[in-house]
Image (cartoon, coloured by chain):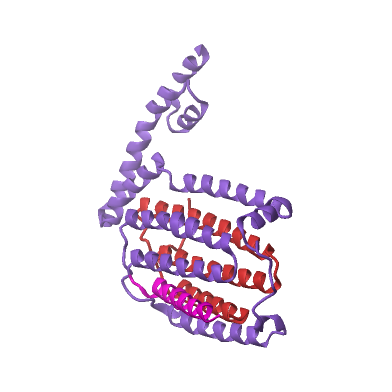
């Protein structure tokens, strides 16, 4: 009993400290590390609540896999620190809003009519929260949510690949945009248009070259240069 | 320990997450704060599952973990795409959505 209380307060202090570290630390890398500590403390709390499988999944999936993903992205984008601490109206109102929400939630919890909140919970059998019990529930009663969750994971993985893949057109666009942003704006007007003309002039030959392959470049080349229209047609006819 | 302690602790963690989402401007840290809020929900679910003596709440917590993993994957993909397009990694600078 006493050991349980000591464990609870240690884990609660770890969880709250980790959460505060996530919010208050300036460097995203240290925020991620604080979240790892928070997750480990939370796994201890799950153990105290007799949820052994959830605790193990928390440690392996969250603190292990997901946090490694975060670390990779922080290392990739170079852990940029924020320049100014939360300016603006939202930045100032945010903590006040959160404190108000906390008071409200505490009133709601203590004022709720749930008598069982002030007990240690129902007496449960020995296998409560074991992998066997959870697996049985997942595959019998919650089979459809289980399958839906796996489908959701698949969709998220495909979405992430689509979002983060290196697209050729996207890179070209950023290369074109960069000099304009760098301060060539006064002379950039005619220059940018000249660049576009150059791009248009180079496109029809590319269209004729790729003409027999697919119909879209041929169609694209039509309005810009009508003279080149007879050229791709015989090629398309012969092919 | 009484169940109410766990629920109050989950309320604390949730509110810390809310404050982080509202004040921080780095999208990575905002994702981390979303994780905090989801974890607070998980803790409340598991605590109520213990209170009722029914393991179904723990299955809900597992599903929440799956949803959180999906959210992380898509969010991190967006951040990497922002970095590739040389958009500043700051939610105040991202004002328009275009492809």
**Residue A239 percent location from the top left of the image:** 50, 14
Does residue A61 appear to the left or right of A143 in the view shown? Answer: left
**Residue A94 percent location from the top left of the image:** 48, 79
Residue sitting at 41 percent across and 41 percent down?
A: A167
Would you say residue A14 sits in the magenta stretch? Answer: yes
Does the magenta stretch mainly form a helix, a strand or a loop?
Answer: helix
Q: Which chain is red?
A: B
> Which quadrant: the N terminus of chain B?
bottom right
Q: Which chain is purple?
A: A
* Residue lying furthest top: A238
Residue A214 visible, this orientation: yes
Number of numbered tags placed on the structure image? 0
Which is more toward the observer, A178 or A73?
A73
Which is more toward the observer, A146 or A50?
A50
**Residue A206 percent location from the top left of the image:** 39, 27
Stretch of the chain drawn in magenta = A1-26
Would you say residue A141 sits in the magenta stretch? Answer: no
Residue B97 visible, this orientation: no
- In the rendered view, would you say A119 is above or below A151? below
Residue sitting at 53 percent across and 44 percent down?
A: A158
Which is more toward the observer, B22 or A139?
A139
- In the rendered view, would you say A230 is above or below A222? above
**Residue A34 percent location from the top left of the image:** 39, 69
Residue sitting at 53 percent across and 75 percent down?
A: B14
Q: Quadrant of residue B3?
A: bottom right
Q: Quadrant of residue B6?
A: bottom right
Which is more toward the observer, A204 or B16?
B16
């Amino acid at each position: 009993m006493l050991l349980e209380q000591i464990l609870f307060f240690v884990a609660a202090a770890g969880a709250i400290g980790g959460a505060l570290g996530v919010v208050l630390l300036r460097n995203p890398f240290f925020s991620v590390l604080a979240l790892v500590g928070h997750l480990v403390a939370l796994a201890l709390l799950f153990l105290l609540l007799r949820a052994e499988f959830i605790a193990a999944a928390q440690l392996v999936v969250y603190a292990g896999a997901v946090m490694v993903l975060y670390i990779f992205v922080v290392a990739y984008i170079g852990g940029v620190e924020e320049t100014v601490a939360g300016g603006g109206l939202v930045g100032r109102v945010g903590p006040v809003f959160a404190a108000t929400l906390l008071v409200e939630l505490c009133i709601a919890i203590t004022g709720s009519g749930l008598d069982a909140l002030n007990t240690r919970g129902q007496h449960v059998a020995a296998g409560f929260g074991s992998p066997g019990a959870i697996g049985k529930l997942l595959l019998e009663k919650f089979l459809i949510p289980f399958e839906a969750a796996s489908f959701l994971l698949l969709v998220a993985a495909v979405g992430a690949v689509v979002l983060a893949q290196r697209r050729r057109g996207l890179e070209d666009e950023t290369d074109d945009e960069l000099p304009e942003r760098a301060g060539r704006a006064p002379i950039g007007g005619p220059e940018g248009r000249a660049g576009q003309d150059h791009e248009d002039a180079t496109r029809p030959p590319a269209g004729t070259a790729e003409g027999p392959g697919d119909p879209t470049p041929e169609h694209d080349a039509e309005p810009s240069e009508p003279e080149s229209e007879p050229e791709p047609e015989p090629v398309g006819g012969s092919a | 320990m009484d169940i109410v302690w766990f629920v109050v602790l989950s309320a604390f963690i949730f509110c810390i997450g809310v404050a982080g989402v509202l004040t921080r401007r780095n999208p990575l840290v905002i994702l981390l704060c979303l994780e905090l809020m989801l974890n607070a929900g998980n803790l409340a679910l598991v605590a109520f599952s213990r209170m009722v003596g029914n393991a179904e709440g723990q299955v809900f917590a597992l599903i929440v973990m799956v949803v959180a993993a999906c959210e992380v994957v898509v969010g991190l993909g967006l951040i990497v795409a922002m970095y590739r397009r040389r958009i500043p990694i700051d939610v105040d600078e991202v004002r328009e959505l275009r492809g």
